[in-house]
Image (cartoon, rainbow, N blue to C red):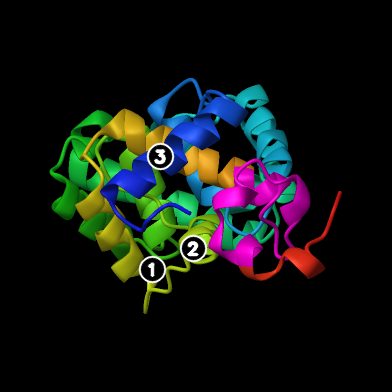
Amino acid sequence: MHSCSGAGLKKLFSELFEFFGEQHWWPAKTKFEVCVGAILTQNTSWKNVEKSIMELKKKRKLTVSAMNSTSLRDLTKLIRSSGYYNQKAKTLKDFCKHVVCNYHGNLNSFLSKPNDGLREELLSIKGIGPETADSIILYAAKKPSFVVDAYTERVMNRFFGLKMKSKVALKEFLEKNLNKDVALYNEFHALLVALGKEFCRKKPLCCDCPINKKCSHYGFNKKTAVKI
């Protein structure tokens, strides 16, 4: 069993990378597409987000200026497949308005801000929470900000027996024990998502998990572990 330390985290990363390989996240061609995807993926599957992204591309709405000038009603129709489309359309419009009003529509200028300032501004936009903000910082701005989502919490809890009082505390722990490296944060988060989707589900498929022999949860639940 790996210890819950910097060395243990690195070993976990290596084992996940060996099994799953490079994840190629975030799957987007532009920084704005990353931002849009990060907002749309809240409470839905990536497949649904991809459908919305395709619709936005077809209508040539996947730029700050184009989306900013699109009516809320039309934008809502284009992203309908992502679910919660009324709320998400409003968030997208507010995001674009923020960039236009404060940075003359220059997304690069906005994303070039230091981490703390950028995160604070992102969180000030209604509909953007910590997970979405960190995704934008890491994958669009390419700055080291570890994304702590439900998969991250679940794997850390089960594998290491690590129970933090909040996502904020877990984020601080991970960033303290890992080198502040964008590529590492990027790949590690993507690998945790892959593990969470395929094996470490709400009802875990422990018997077939590639890291079960070193997992704290599996060690205590071998008799009741579920097979695929």
Q: Residue at x 39, y 29 (%)?
A: 31
Residue sitting farthest toward the right: 228
Mark 2 falls on what kind of element? helix
Could you say where residue 5 lies in the image, as x and y percent from the top left? 30, 54
C-alpha separation, residue under disc 3 versus residue under disc 2: 18 Å
Q: Which residue is mark 1?
A: 167
Residue 58 lies left or right of residue 4; in this view the side is right
Mark 3 falls on what kind of element? helix
Closest to the observer, 17 or 52: 17
Q: Residue at x 50, y 66 (%)?
A: 157
Q: Which residues are magenta?
A: 195-219
Closest to the observer, 122 or 73: 122
Q: Quadrant of residue 42?
A: bottom right
As shown in the figure, which amino acid type bears the numbered disc 3? Answer: Lys
Q: Which residue is mark 3?
A: 11
| 174 part of magenta stretch | no
Kindly tell me whether residue 163 is visible in this rendering.
yes
Kindly tell me whether residue 77 is visible in this rendering.
no
Query: Mark 2 vs mark 1: which is more N-terminal?
Result: 2
**For the residues carrying marks 3 and 2, which lies nearer the camera in this image?**
3
As shown in the figure, which amino acid type bears the numbered disc 1? Answer: Lys
Q: Residue at x 22, y 60 (%)?
A: 120
Q: Residues within 10 Å of mark 3 (few under 14, many from 20)?
A: some
Q: Quadrant of residue 138?
A: top left
Q: Residue at x 60, y 45 (%)?
A: 211
Q: Residues within 10 Å of mark 2 (few under 14, many from 20)?
A: some
Picture disc at residue 153: 2
C-alpha separation, residue under disc 2 versus residue under disc 1: 7 Å
